[in-house]
Amino acid sequence: MSASNSPPVLSVYNTLTRRKEPLEPIRPDEVRLYVCGPTVYSWVHIGNARTFTIFDVVVRYLRYRGYRVFYVRNYTDVDDKIIHAAQEAGEDPNALAERFVHAFEEDARGVGMLPPDAAPRVTQVIPEIIALIQALLDQGVAYVSDGDVYFQVSRWPEYAKLSRRNLDDLRAGERVTPGEQKREPLDFALWKAEKPGEPAWDAPWGRGRPGWHIECSAMSEQVLGQPFDIHGGGLDLIFPHHENEIAQSEAAHHLPLARVWMHAGFLELENAKMSKSLGNVVRLRDALAKVDGEALRLFFLSSHYRNGLAFSDEALADAEKRIEYFHETLQRVEERLGARELRPGPVHGDPDAHLRAFEQAMDDDFNTAGALAALSALFGQMNELLDRPPVPDRALVARTLAALRAVAATMGGVLGILQSPPGVWLERQRDRLVQKRGVDRELVERLIAERGEARRQKDFARSDAIRDRLLQMGIELRDGPSGTQWKVRS
Ligand SMILES: [Zn+2]
């Protein structure tokens, strides 16, 4: 299904202007988007996973709205943290980075992220980085000091235009990092002189490796050009990372870096910002071992992306129940409709109204919370049609259910959920719970067979007793047209 034909009125909150603005891409039907990717020194934690899931949905929705999207998400594969982790593990830094790129991709698939159109790595753009640093040196906004190269913030009058921080406050708060040879406290490293045992590349000013910020300026320019449409990342990247990206790219080329800056809020665990350096980390991998990827996605999208989201086991369990309810409803719709073809005809009410509500929410700065409310309303109507149909005409009800199911699939495609047949998902979820709760599967199936036999012999006391016993084991039964289904109560 394609988006309705009204002209796009998508609005996006731009951190640069502190306003919601209509999205006006540089090329009318194309959106070029760059999101700062993971530093691959460890497993991705769920805070970062939420940010990347949000941009996955942004990309999906822009495509749904008819834009061609070019989505870039980089890997930082040279960095102090990687070198440190490699030294601690006695491993080659490249090998360690490679290992965690693979781990990230696996985890990203687990939570249903589409691969980006390009995933450049720092080690692949060293010549571009060197050229960019050279341009900054040539323009007199950067200087070499003892083999390091620094960006001289005082030479770039627009510095702090994204974060709107006060430069005097920043200067007062800046601590001198041992070993750095800066002229002024706010100057930041573009290049770090070679140290023993660290990866290094030749450059005109001496061997070394890039600083963190310069990589995104070089990679975005290489893949998307300058300016591009949307630059995204977590809220914690506004300062200094994105501020420094702007300074580097704009001072070098005298062009804006990106039109719109989007920032995702924090995932909060016990009211502390979730960050690997603070230690209160839940790895995405650990979360995926606890709950299904679709449940996790639903949880990530349950608040507006700019808002914080509190992580708790209860919140995850709620999301899991919700996604199970969606799939169970879809399975009941599937059973009701069967394989027979529906003759075209009128439907009850206006199934597309749900889609319009969904689009209205998503058009308003990708309000996924509102979009999920529209999805829930749709499922509410499906359940009403299944259980208490407001009209007697069964064909009319069936056509309406089919229309609602199609709308649900469209919304699910944008949100990255409900894409597998409900039976497949429910089976997978049951397997997960069987394992988690240590359910004796053989016993359950034997008892269900005995109950079936009792029912055939009209021994309802016995069949009820078996049902109760199963309930005590946390097993729920549902008798449907294709026999008795069972599930582990979530
Ligand atoms: Zn970046």
Image (spheres, rainbow, N blue to C red):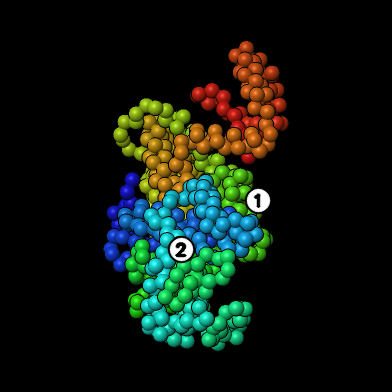
Above-or-below relation of 407 to 485 = below
- Residue 5 relative to residue 152: left or right: left
Q: Position of residue 49 (x, y in %)?
A: 54, 56
Query: Can residue 18 be seen from the camera position used here?
Result: no
Query: Can residue 78 be seen from the camera position used here?
Result: yes
Residue that mark 1 sits on? 313
Residue that mark 2 sits on? 122
Query: Mark number for residue 176?
Result: none
The response on whether ligand 1 sits within 8 Å of label 1 is no
Q: Nearer the viewer, residue 13 or 139?
A: 139
Kind of residue at badge 1: Asp
Q: Residue at x 58, y 68 (%)?
A: 196
Mark earlier in primary sequence (1, 2)? 2
Q: Which secondary structure, mark 1?
A: helix
Q: Position of residue 393 (x, y in %)?
A: 39, 31
The response on whether ligand 1 sits within 8 Å of label 2 is no
The quadrant the N terminus occupies is top left
Q: Residue at x 46, y 36 (%)?
A: 421
Q: Residue 157 appears in which quarter of the rendering?
A: bottom left
Q: Residue at x 39, y 67 (%)?
A: 127
> Residue farthest to the top?
457
Label 2: how many Cα within 10 Å (few below 14, some 14–19, many 20+): many
The quadrant the C terminus occupies is top right
Q: Residue at x 55, y 82 (%)?
A: 181
Q: Position of residue 407 (x, y in %)?
A: 39, 44
